Structures are given as structure tokens and as C-alpha cells.
Image (cartoon, helix red, strand yellow):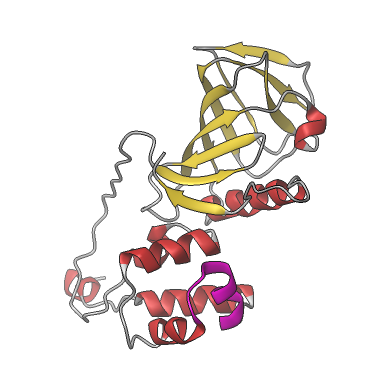
Amino acid sequence: MPTEALSNLSTPSIGEALRERRGYHGWTLSDVAAKTGISKSTLSKIENDLISPSYQSILQLCAGLGIEIGDLVSGSNSKGEDLRRLTGRRSVSHGEAGLVMADDNFTYTYFCTDIAHKRIIPMMIEVRANSLNEVGGLWNHVGEEYVYVLEGAIELQTELYEPTILSKGDSAYFDSTMGHAYLATGDQPAKLLVMCSSATPNLAQTLREVLSERLGKRVKKGSNKKDAVADKEI
């Protein structure tokens, strides 16, 4: 395709991206309003490009719907300006800032979330659970996984192998479709750098949906802990 044609490709607005996401999941405006805390009237105006969402509204949408900022804003062109197609992508996460999902046993922090459709999903996990009963047993998902212990020590439980102790500086690589779990050893939490990879489209979204479901099943009745995604710097 000629360069001139590439530069003239139309790109979806944030409203279009939101409308497509809502339609894909079968959500009503009321559903999205309940998930995000944004009123139905405001959501309708965003979807119809009558208003441009503020940065705070974008964060609320991403947190409530469990999607990355890049899923809404990458390639959006609300002003109708021609955009030059780029082949290089880059994202920077400062400190330990990222998209956080947590319960009593784990805190997952997803990094570099402003790029959508990544083949590698980098995250940091703080592990507080000490037994399989606490985490609901082994779990599995698409792709492959690399774990590096930053602080403390963990017991790596896997479906086909004996439990393995990994201490600070140790690492492991395994097939994520095999049942697995991370358990802290001792009284102190462990901190891990984890990379998940797969050719599956929307890998980050898939992982967060699986994680959100598992965290939700473990929320204690009456607990003030939230299993929802929260965009915040920690």
C-alpha cells in the first residue's frame, strides 16, 4: 500500500473504541456507568463524539472496564487530522507505577499499559499467600511465563513437577497452560517480576479477565478489600 494511502487511513475516536468495546461484551450504557462511575448521559456524549473525555474519565473507563489506556486512545484521531503510521512502539513506567489488581493474597501491578496488544505482559506481583487453599488451588492461562524473584522467597507450585523453592535472584520459565501457583515462604511477602507471553490477541485483557474472576471468587464477605482494577501509583 502506498505511503500516501497509509497516511490517509481513518482512525477510530475514543467514542468509537468505547462503543465497539461495549458492543463486543454486550454491555448497556447502564452497565458501563455502574462499572466506571461515569453517568450514562456523559458516556453517551463520549460515544457520539459530542465531548472529549478528560484524562480522569479515561482512567475511570480503563479501571472500570479492565482495559489498557492504549485500547482506547492508541490511534484515536478525534480532530480528523492525518496521522503518520509508525512501526516503532515505546512505553516507559516510572518507579512501580502501573495498573493494580489486588486482594488479601496478591497485588498485581501491570506495567507499560499505554501500549495495547502487547505480546509480552510485564508485571510485578507481591505474594502474601502461604497455602494453596488461600488462593483456590492451581490456575492456568494461555501462553508462557517467566518469573524472577526480586525480594523474599516463594514456593513455585506446578501441576507436573514437585514444588520448587525460589529465593531472591532465582528465576523460572514454564508453560502457563500448566496449572501453577506462587506461594510466599515464611512470614514476609515476596516480590516477583513476571513476564507473560503469547501470540494471543489482547493477551493483557485475557489475563486481567482471568485474574479478576479468580480474585472475585476469593473476596471475603464483609471485607473492605476490593478485587477491582484501580489505576494508581504505588
Residue 138 at least partly seen: no
Q: Locate residue 140 relative to residue 24 in the image: left or right.
A: right
Compared to residue 234, the image places residue 155 above or below, namely above
Instruction: Please state which of residues 176 and 79 is positioned toward the viewer in this rendering.
Output: 79
Instruction: Please state which of residues 81 and 55 is positioned toward the viewer in this rendering.
Output: 55
Instruction: Please state which of residues 38 and 163 is positioned toward the viewer in this rendering.
Output: 38
Q: Residue at x 52, y 56 (%)?
A: 202
Residue 183: where, in percent of width, then height? Answer: 69, 24
| Number of marks drawn | 0
Q: Which residues are magenta?
A: 29-39
Residue 49 at least partly seen: yes
Residue 64: where, in percent of width, then height? Answer: 53, 63
Residue 193: where, in percent of width, then height? Answer: 49, 28
Q: Residue at x 42, y 48 (%)?
A: 232
Compared to residue 165, the image places residue 215 above or below, namely below
Compared to residue 69, the image places residue 191 above or below, namely above
Q: Residue at x 41, y 44 (%)?
A: 98
Q: Residue at x 33, y 88 (%)?
A: 50
Q: Quadrant of the C terminus?
A: top left
